[in-house]
Image (cartoon, rainbow, N blue to C red):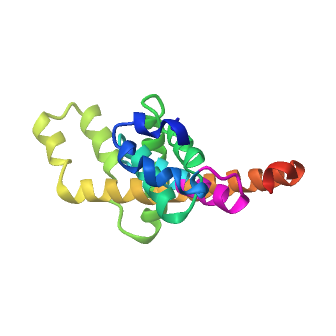
Amino acid sequence: MPRRYNLHKYPILKWFAASARKRDYLWSLRDSNMIRAIYIGWFIAFIPVYGLQMILAFVFCFLLKANCLVAMALQWITNPLTIPFFLAGQYFLGNLLLGRFFDSPNIEGKIMEAFVSGADMETVKSLVSAQNLEYVGACVIVGGFLLSLIGAFLTALSYKIWSGKHSVIAK
């Protein structure tokens, strides 16, 4: 994790090192900075831009005056081992929500049908249409946004309870 004194060692963050050292809120443990960092971290963790998450977390913390260490640490929620599970969860939650308001193309049912019936590759390829990909993308984004709000709310609530008991850190 980058710290104030070793920012210059990170490939992209080194460009912001001098400016970041001057901004105390990037390292502050104040409640307002921490809560912003929690929401930023959860939100970016569920955006499917893997590989750019740490940079985005740093930039958003820079712009929104949040603790960068907390927001960047939350990016490790989605790592190479957990990405498939989170993406599936995001899709199914988004499909559940979007399916209530829009016409769902029932992609997973069609794919299972094609594999069970031993369909040829042309049938399977036909399922990968632009409309189906847009729907899957929308489901992943909507599901990820909802999961990030739930995760951020629960984490912020836990932090507020913990910081209330440990008021030395909260000040």
User: What residue is shown at x 71% (from left), y 57% (from top)?
Assistant: 30
* Furthest residue in direction left, as rendered: 122
Instruction: Please determine whether, in this image, residue 61 is positioned above or below residue 17.
Output: below
User: What residue is shown at x 61% (from left), y 60% (from top)?
Assistant: 36
Horizontal side of residue 171 vs 108, given as left or right: right
* Furthest residue in direction right, as rendered: 165
Residue 92 visible in the shown view: no
| Residue 3 is a magenta residue | no
Coordinates of residue 21 in the picture (x, y in percent): 52, 50
Quarter location, residue 80: top left
Coordinates of residue 54 in the picture (x, y in percent): 43, 44
Coordinates of residue 85 in the picture (x, y in percent): 47, 37
**Count of marks, rendered view:** 0
Residue 63 visible in the shown view: yes
Quarter location, residue 117: top left
User: Viewer-proximal residue, 157 or 12?
Assistant: 12
Horizontal side of residue 164 vs 135, given as left or right: right
User: What residue is shown at x 46% (from left), y 58% (from top)?
Assistant: 60
Instruction: Please determine whether, in this image, residue 14 is positioned above or below residue 60.
Output: above
Quarter of the image where the C terminus is located: bottom right
User: Viewer-proximal residue, 12 or 126?
Assistant: 12
* Furthest residue in direction top, as rendered: 81
| Residue 35 is a magenta residue | yes
Instruction: Please determine whether, in this image, residue 73 is positioned above or below residue 154.
Output: above
Coordinates of residue 18 in the picture (x, y in percent): 44, 50
Q: Which residues are magenta?
A: 27-40
User: What residue is shown at x 18% (from left), y 57% (from top)?
Assistant: 130
User: Looking at the magenta stretch, what is its main secondary structure?
Assistant: helix
User: Viewer-proximal residue, 4 or 101?
Assistant: 4
User: Viewer-proximal residue, 20 or 143?
Assistant: 20
